Amino acid sequence: MELKNQSSSTSGFILLGLSSNPHLQKPLFAIFLSMYLVTLVGNMLIILAIRSDSRLHTPMYFFLSNLSFMDICFTTVIVPKMLANLLSETKGISYVGCLVQMYFFMAFGNTDSYLLASMAIDRLVAIYNPFLYDVAMRPRRCLLMLLGSCTISHLHALFRVLLMSRLSFCASHVIKHFFCDTQPVLKLSCSDTSSSQTVIMVETLAVISTPCLCILFSYLRIIVTVLRIPSAAGKWKAFSTCGSHLTVVALFYGSVIYVYFRPVSMYSVEDRVATVMYTVVTPMLNPFIYSLRNKDMKRGLRKLRERIHS
């Protein structure tokens, strides 16, 4: 099948998925459907709990509710199509559909990344200068941080998709992945992708490293500030407010860095497994991570349950 670079092309791709073994398709469908439903329900409960409890109307939970919403969008871009392909013999996706999926995957994924950075800044201000917290993290500024995160992420996604749309695809049309990601699609191109790979690597480094460095800087300042607290109880109380966020950051960035900060030629099956971690597993675990050891969230969830049953 020949696939030209014009967006008007009627040809498409075949998404190989996690495994081509026909005996694994239904078990994988059951597993990922369960994970997707848990992700939807868990993140919706976080959003509703925060909205229903006025004591959770703070900057930290403002960012958390938006992170939960982005996680729902992020997984919805990928998982439903993957589930459909697991039960389909064709496993196809159109050229335009592939670019659209790539766009929203990058837009929502990068917004997640910038929201994690915003949450790190929130924790830094709360611990480093708590007396100025209400001024520094006022609602207008939080909203601007959210809008900035979305704008940068969508511009990044648009640039990447425009770059990919200029490539030609002439030989194989089988994407060795379960969705249209940049690396496996680039490997299919019969164009000279050396310049595209360089641009993508530099641009990815800039977009991903900016929030990553922001998080690192924030936590270095937090560590220095906490170490100055004289009592052990005070140190533990300060660090305990960051535990959930650090866990999510480690899960998200660990797999993202492994997948994207390597040349396209090194892309392998292991990358597909690593991609599952930040596209499916992390969004599913976020509600548990942020609620199991968080007294405020537990109270909010109890209040939500009481409102539902009343």
Image (tube, rainbow, N blue to C red):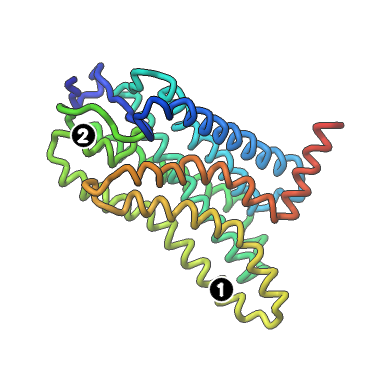
Q: Which residue is mark 2?
A: 188
Graded by Cα atoms within 10 Å as few (under 14), some (14 to 19) or many (20 or more), the crowding at tag 2 reads: many
Lower position in the chain sequence, tag 2 or tag 1:
2
Q: CA distance from mark 2 to mark 1?
A: 46 Å
Is residue 212 rendered to the left or right of residue 228? left
Q: Position of residue 257 (x, y in %)?
A: 37, 54
Amino acid carrying label 2: it is: Leu
Decide which of 249, 148 is in the foreground and name it.
Answer: 249
Coordinates of residue 288 in the picture (x, y in percent): 64, 47
**What kind of element bears circle 1?**
helix
| Quarter holding residue 68 | top right
Kindly identify which residue carries mark 1: 223
- Say what amino acid the circle numbered 1 marks: Ile
Q: Position of residue 297 (x, y in %)?
A: 72, 49
Badge 1, how many Cα within 10 Å: few under 14, some, many 20+? some
Quadrant location of residue 206?
Answer: bottom left
